[in-house]
Image: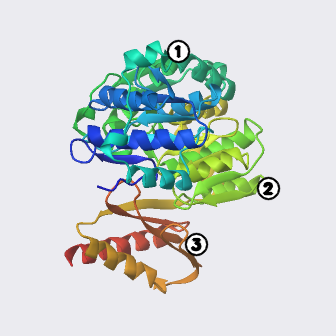
Amino acid sequence: MAIRFGTSGWRAVISDEFTFSNVKRVAQAIAEFMKSTGGSRVIVARDTRFMTERYAQIVSEVMAGNGIKVLMPENPTPTPVVSFAIRSLELSGGINITASHNPPEYCGIKFNSSNGAPAAPDITKKIEDIINKIKPDEIHAMSLSKASNEGLFEIIDPKPQYIKALSEIVDFERIKAGGLRVICDLLYGAAINYLDELCQNLCADCNVVHNYRNAYFGGDRPEPDEDRLREYSTLVRDGGWDIVIATDGDADRFGIMDDTGSYVKPNEIIALLAHHLYVDKNMIGPVARSISTSHAVDAVASEFNQAALETPVGFKYLANMILSENAVIAGEESGGLSVQNHIPEKDGILACLLVLEMLAYEQKPLSTIRKDFQEKYGAFYNTRIDIAMESMDQKREMLKHFAELDSFCGMKIVDHDNIDGFRYLFEEAGSWLLIRESGTEPVLRIYVESKSKEVFQRMISSMRELSRRFASN
C-alpha cells in the first residue's frame, strides 16, 4: 500500500491504513531521511487521540533503533510546541502523532523539519519514496528502556520555555489589565494545560470547557469551526461573556466567537490581527496568506504600504514567509496563523492570545472592533463549500468543468491561474473563485469572495446548484 503525505503530514483511519506496521514504515523512512541529512536528535510527541501513546512509543523505538536520540514530552503536546522545541533545542526535526482536526477515527503523523516548519514537499516526497521501498526486515527498533540506558531516549518538558516565548510576543500584563470574561473550549485536545492555564491566569473570569481527554472528542471532529462553537451563542449573549476562544485537536488551529454570539471566521481574524500588529504593536513587514484566504488582509497591508504575499494552500508554504520574508502575520482561512519572530508553524494558542491582547488594547467589544474594521476597509464576503466526492468520475467531471470555465454568474474573468487548483478573478467587486482538492480529506473545496453582498450570494447560489448537478450524475 502506497503512503502519501497531504498538506499536513500523513493521516489515515485507525486499524485500516493507520496500523502499527505502517507507522513503523513511516518512522523508518523519516529516520533514514534524517540520517541522510546528518540528523541525530528528534522530538516525538502526541495529541489526545486514541492510542497515541502506543504510536509515539513505536515511532520512538524506531528512531532509537536507527541511532537517533528521542526527546519525548510526557503529556499530550500541541504541534506549535513541537515546532518551538525543535528550534529552541536545535533538534534535527519533530514528529507529532496527530490527525489535527480530522474525525476521531483518524490518526496521523506530522513531521517538522530542523527549522521548525512543516516538512516541505521535496522532503515529504523523499520520505514517501523511502516508505514505499522499505521491507519489514529493514525496520530497526530498540526498546525505550535500552534506548534510555544508551542515552537515546529522554523525557522533556518544553512547556515552560514555550510559555516564556509567548510572553515575549503577547503582552500578558495588558491582557490582565483588560478584565476580560472568556469562555475557553479546548475540544478535548492537546491545548489542555496550556491555553486553559494561560486563560485562567490572564483573564478576570475564565470558563474552561472540555479540558480533559476524550479520545473520541465527544463524538465529533475536534475542529473549532462555526458548527462546533454554535452551542455557545446564547450563553455568550445572556452571560455577558466577552469572547469564546477555542483550539483544535493539536492546537494549531483556532476558533473565535464574539460578544454577540457570532462566529468570527479566521479570514476576518487574520485581517483584524494584521491591523492590530501594525497599529498597536508597531510591527513592520509584509503580510502573507494562502491562495484560499480572504484578500481583506491585503487591504490592511496596503493601508500601511506593505506587500501582501500569496502562497499555495498549506502552512509549509507560509512558513517560508515567516522565515525568509519576515512577515508580520502569515495566515490561512482554515484557522492557522503565526507571526513575526515566532515559529514557522500554525499556532492556535498564540492566535487566541493575540485576539485577547487586541481586545485589551482596543478596550472595545470584539463586535465593535469588527464594525470599525468594516467601516475602514469595507466588507469582504467569503465562504468555503466542501463537496464530498463519492467517485473519481464525479470529481474529474467537476474539475473538468472548472478547468474550462470562461465566465461565471455572468461575470467576465479578468485573470486565472492553476497555482493550487483552479482560480478565477472577476472584474466585478474584487470577486474571485477557487476550486481545489483537499490535501487532508476526500472532498473538493470551493472558495468564493466578493466585496458585494449581492454578487457573493449569486456566486454561492450558482456553486450550490453546480454541486447538486454533479452529485446527481
- Disc 1 marks a residue whose amino acid type is Asn
- Estimate the x, y position of residue 157 in percent, counting from the top left: 51, 17
Relative to residue 53, is residue 167 drawn left or right? Answer: right
Position of the N terminus by quadrant:
bottom left
Relative to residue 393, is residue 70 drawn left or right? Answer: right
Looking at the image, residue 160 lies above or below residue 306:
above
The residue shown at (20%, 76%) is: 472
Q: Is residue 436 visible?
A: yes
Marks 3,1: beta carbons within 8 A: no
Badge nearest the viewer, 3 or 2: 2
Q: Which numbered disc, 3 or 1, marks the residue that appears first in the sequence?
A: 1
Which mark, residue 201?
A: 1
CA distance for labels 1 and 2: 37 Å
Looking at the image, residue 459 lies above or below residue 291:
below
CA distance for labels 3 and 1: 45 Å
Element assignment for label 3: loop
For label 3, the residue is: 429
For label 2, the residue is: 305
Relative to residue 456, is residue 396 drawn left or right? Answer: left
- Disc 3 marks a residue whose amino acid type is Ala
Badge nearest the viewer, 3 or 1: 1
